[in-house]
Image (cartoon, grey):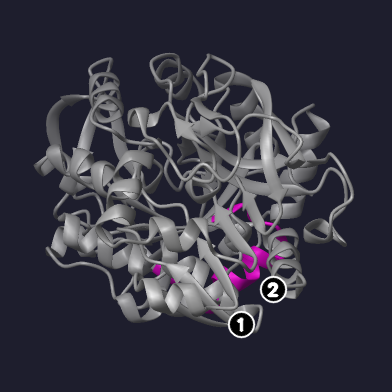
Amino acid sequence: MNVAVVKLGVGNTASVMFALERAGADAVLTDDAAQIGAAERVILPGVGAAGRAMELMRERKLTATLKAFPRPLLGICLGQQLLYESSEESGAETLGVLPGRVTRLPASRATPSPHMGWTRLRRECEHPLFEGVADGAYAYFVHSYVCPLGSETIASAEYGARFGAAVAQGNFFGCQFHPERSGATGARVLRNFLRLPC
Amino acid sequence: MPAKRIIACLDVKDGRVVKGVRFEGHADAGDPVELAQRYRDEGADEIVIYDIAASAAGRTLDYGWLAQVARSLDVPLAVAGGVRSLDRAVACLEHGADKVSINSPALERPELITEIADTAGSQCVVVGVDSRRIDGEWRVYQYTGDVSTTKRTPRRMLDWIVEAQERGAGEIVLNCMDRDGTRDGFDVEQLAEARARLSIPLIASGGAGAASHFADVFRGADVSGALAASIFHFRRVGIADVKAAVRAAGFEVRP
């Protein structure tokens, strides 16, 4: 399976590449629109801040390619947030393939921000992306902004309030958690993603 | 709510895992790739690799074995040791680290915290703080990887952690040096004071000697995670035993 991992600035993309390698995918890290457009699968990893990521996407003329990508695309962490219309983070206008706005995680004494650690997933519906993943399985999260709950939400998690932990709509998918660092649960989600029908 | 994190730290010197009491007299404790793998299998929620001699010696960690460790792990990996520029932080992330932890270099040049946070995001920047009580106040120490280079700084720990947070740190690891390697338990009083000043996660370090110590620090200081090295290396306490004790005390942990 040929997977293009979108290179957008600096982050733990090496971690994502290693996880894809473990899942048996043939992954390439690239910011080339043609290569991304031709891939069988695209992963949009979570890197930096929303405003900067969109700027880099526009500079590299990737926005249209990503929005029109016809096969399964998975956004990870910030990558999932970028699928929505806008983000409270730097007031960015994002890809808009999913409806709604990403908001700041309210920090409190009980819930330090960023939300960093292993939190249970609640499955909101049956979905092939989560095949073999038990309700209540732990996944590793690191984020300061959250996606809204909607019809696209296939799993949620709670940190202060409940938010969208995994989403699916058409050929667009997202994980707020890091499947590349979520043990057997994350590995299963990645393998499921690679096996989704085109 | 996230589960309380149990973090296994590998102190590495010249490519081997070492651990000494209060950073003196290091004893060989094995190969970093094998140990990281073992901790992952035993249920460590996160692995930290700390090149203890790098900062004092003015060099950075060896990226070759970093990539080897990262390739085999499916839990979060943080690295520390001599990350004194944005370029080096980026190189660590590009070799498979999920976060970089900076300690002495952040004291040398606090702007480094912001530079890494602005480029890679706050979630990638952990600030490690070594603190010791002097005349009734917690003071920050620097270059603690080697006893001959360790020096006291003029900074108060409680001020420095707030400054680090304001500059963009995503997490603080507070290593209480008076407890380090003693196995007397975490410094709950100091950690509770630190926790009260932070809105980012705080990780306890220094002093773990028994499974019950982890439950004590979650109860007494409400930290997000607790880190240990030597007790795990020498199998004095297993990670599963720690998790059982923490769960029995009423806290959520990942199975």
Q: Earlier in the sequence, mark 1 or mark 2?
A: 1
The percent coordinates of residue B40 (x first, y second) are 64, 64
Q: What element carries label 1?
A: loop
Q: Is residue A146 left or right of residue B49?
A: right
Q: Is residue B219 magenta?
A: no
Q: In this view, does B102 lie to the left or right of B79?
A: left
Quarter occupied by residue B138: top left
Can you say which quadrant of the picture contains the N terminus of chain A? bottom right
Q: Do the residues labelled 1 and 2 touch (CB within 8 Å)?
A: yes
The correct choice, above or below, for B193 with respect to B16 in the image is above
Q: Mark 1 points at which residue?
A: A25
Question: Label 2 lies in what chain?
Answer: A
Question: Label 1 lies in what chain?
Answer: A
The amino acid on which the numbered mark 2 sits, given as a three-letter code, is Leu
Magenta residues, start to end: B27-46
Q: Is residue B42 magenta?
A: yes
Can you say which quadrant of the picture contains the C terminus of chain A? bottom right
Q: What element carries label 2?
A: helix
Q: What residue do we see at 51% from left, 67% from top? A: A16
Q: Which mark is residue A194?
A: 2
> Which is more toward the observer, A140 or B35?
A140
Quarter occupied by residue A178: bottom right
Q: Residue B188 carries which label?
A: none
The percent coordinates of residue B174 (x first, y second) are 39, 35
The percent coordinates of residue B159 (x first, y second) are 24, 19
The amino acid on which the numbered mark 1 sits, given as a three-letter code, is Ala
> Which is more toward the observer, B93 or B203?
B93
Q: How far apart are the two marked residues, 1 and 2, measured between alpha carbons?
A: 8 Å
The correct choice, above or below, for B121 with respect to A132 in the image is above
Whether residue B74 is visible, yes or no, is yes
